Amino acid sequence: MIGLGSLGFLAPWLLLGLLALPVLWWLLRAVPPAPLRRRFPAVTLLLGLEDRETTPDRTPWWLLLLRMAAVAAAILAFAQPVLNPSDRIAGRAPLLIALDGSWASAQSWTERQDKLDEILQFATQDGRSVAVINLSERPRGENPLSFDSADSWRGRIKGEQPRAWEPDYAVWQDVIAAADPFETLWLSDGLAREGRAELFAVLSEKGAVSVAQSERDVLALRGIEIEGGALSTTALRLGAGSAPARAVKVVAEGPDPAGITRSLAQGEAAFDAGGMETVASVTLPSELRNRVRRVSLEGVRSAGAVVLTDDSLQRRKVALIGGGSEQEGAVLVSPLHFLRKALVPTAEVIEAGLADSLQATPDVLILADVAELGAAETQDVLDWVEAGGLLVRFAGPRLAASGIGQSEEHPLLPVRLRAGGRTVGGAMSWGAPKALEDFAKDSPFFGLAIPDDVLVESQVMAQPDPNLAERVLASLQDGTPLVTAKDQGEGQVVLFHVTANAEWSSLPLSGLFVQLLERLAISARSTELDSTALEGTVWVPEQVLDGFGVLRDAPALAGVDGARLATRSFSAEMPPGVYKSADQRVALNVLAADRQLAAARWPAGTPFLSMTRTEERPLQALLLMVALVLLCIDILATLLVGGRLRFRGATTALMLLLLWPQGDALAQSTPQDDAALLMAANNTVLAYVETGDTRLDDISRAGLLGLSTELFRRTSVEPVEPVGVNLETDELALYPFLYWPVTDTVRMPSEAAFEKVNAFLRGGGLILFDTRDSNIGRGISGGTPNGKMLQNLARNLDIPALEPVPEDHVLTRAFYLLQDFPGRYADANVWVEAAPPDAEQVEGMPFRNLNDGVTPVVIGGNDWASAWAVTEAGRFSYPVGRGVAGERQREIAIRFGVNLIMHVLTGNYKSDQVHVPALLDRLGQ
């Protein structure tokens, strides 16, 4: 294809025919029309007469020009001209389409899907075989490069999703090197990374390589830390060309007291013109800061624009109580000083009296060489521990001399203690200082490296006891316990058998001291993952991020070794997310703390394609029509010049008008033809609102197709195939139900369309608004981009007051008895028209009398269409949940759809008292 500005030609070689036009002009001029021959014997009778029909000796110039224009129009038409031509890769060789498919691609994923569909459409026209690979996935099967027809790939790529990690180019090099020659289109995410140049070289050996990149900015968040009581994160940008100044907003989210995830605070930051990095801060009180579960860039759908939080952000409250006052001059060697140095960087330290400390609701209480407490204080501490507190005690001279826990086990000590203590390595003692034994596998300290210089000289000894072995967390090389613990109610009591300062051991002088406290979840972990600290532990994914930055429950994945966790080598087996080991949580975020975004560099001469899909307008039919009209005019002109045409000008104009194509031939077909209207009028048809997003419309259609199938199978309702409706042009009154997926990219309908929708609602129709983000449970107040779009739509619609579906609503019993209404997600509330204020429960009925019609709207965010969606073969298109629980969730989603349609068709029929006995019987009452 060649292009001339906004005009392109798919068969440009045919334009060579235009070179023959001068020769045609010369031939037509040199060869005049054949003269008229008349035979008449009485020639003398014609003398003096003038012939009314004359034949020119040469063709008139204007007729020649007309014929030349007709031939030129035909040549141009056969060259297949198109207006606003799209970029395409011409050729017949097999085509490999390589997707980076990373988190950086998610921000422009819809644009990439449209471009991919366009390329496959062109490949179908050219008859090319195609293979599509996602470089963020590992090669699968014996033949990862499966070249197939382009048309078959168009259906398979609709479910492709970006990954939350980045491509590993090295794993594809050998696979591609072993393949037969092909051409390549690389849909790049635009980020520079290792291995790209090497993979490009391998692809270039197979054939030509073209690249398509989005012109949108790539935005991301890197790291999070606490600075001066505020959460601070770094926003990164990779822009195309000279990036202008741009403001961004970060949102801190976490659960409210009811457990519903909400926006807790927001902060703003701005990129300078050409700037690629800025710092955003969110100020929160400590109570709210500890609730934060994620910080994200508002309006950016990408795993790279999300930072998850873990224990490193949870600054625990730790109360320190010392056994005596710190004497002047001895502050730097006191037990509390060593504890402060270990805890202050990552915890909120409280130093007050015992009673005041307990009133501050600390997470941890540390008693450093504190002997006996008063009876009331002992009971207060015991109640606090049994309610879930962690009591950590350090030994010392006072505890050793107090005698507590010797005759019987003390409730605030994990083991019984022997009288006196033990001293080794001194002038008056036997033996050398003792080193620590390697931590056992069942110890929370397992895997920590023990420095050689950590030695113990004195300790309090534990009495031998049948339960002693199971309470030992750490011991010396001679087997004597160093750290013991026991559960007490919901909490735990831990005893370090040495002092918190360096008086009895060198442990407080080493980094192991801080690591031990960390493993006990006393102090928050550093934001950097330490492979040494994680070694020997196993971490299970609790929640994982998808490519769009949505946090979901983790699938059934195997546990991950701590050393591998620290490498941050993301894959399908270890995706970014929150991992848990015992009582500790670690967040693996997409971007490392030192990550910088850099633009990918390509070899000189690499052809680039625009990522934007343009709507081509073929001009072949129009030019052929012009050529045909010109030829018809030529026929009439030839007859007129030759004197064979005798009629007036009005008749000629009428003939030309009849030859001109009628408007119906040029106009587009009407949105709804008579057959479609009759089908909707004579059958039950479920409809969905066309959004203009091809992928989303396909999901809506597949979802209603699956629901229609289940209605046909389970009920007496027999719907026909669902249809999509255009709010601007289609008639809505023929459909009882509309499914309206709401996205932030949907175009706002016109005022006339809103009036049509309001008439539909007032006429008894029902619309299911689905934000598909599981976020409507936070209220219908625009908590997400989709929620904000729903709010904008609702301003123009006649929607009544709403409330979450009450337990006695007809939707809970229209066909099935339900209390939950999940879709692909199960976390969001579902909203319906609020019941009248005077609705009261009638005596003898298990529900209120709400026999007042059908709710005009149902609003939620559980993505019901994806849960209902089936393929043409009848298989479910998208996964729901995991295992048996997921299948149960899908079944409940289908039942909700059945109830919804039955409610639309029958109203509040199930509220009639005649159904009470049957409902009570099914409810078991």
Image: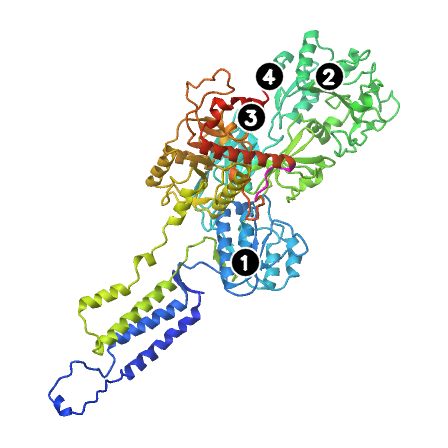
Residue 56 painted magenta: no
The residues tagged by marks 3 and 1 sit, at their Cα atoms, a distance apart of 48 Å
Which of the numbered marks, if any, corresponds to residue 360?
Answer: 4
For discs 1 and 4, the disc positioned in front in the rendered view: 1
Residue drawn at 64 percent across, 61 percent down: 179
Q: Position of residue 648 (x, y in %)?
A: 17, 69
Badge 2 element: loop
Q: Disc 1 marks which amino acid?
A: Ala
Q: Disc 3 marks which amino acid?
A: Gly
User: Mark 1 or mark 4: which comes first in sequence?
Assistant: 1
Badge 4 element: loop
Q: Position of residue 50 (x, y in %)?
A: 13, 84
In depth, the one of 824 and 251 nearer the eye is: 824
Residue drawn at 37 percent across, 34 percent down: 763
Magenta residues, as a range? 877-883
User: Mark 2 or mark 3: which comes first in sequence?
Assistant: 3
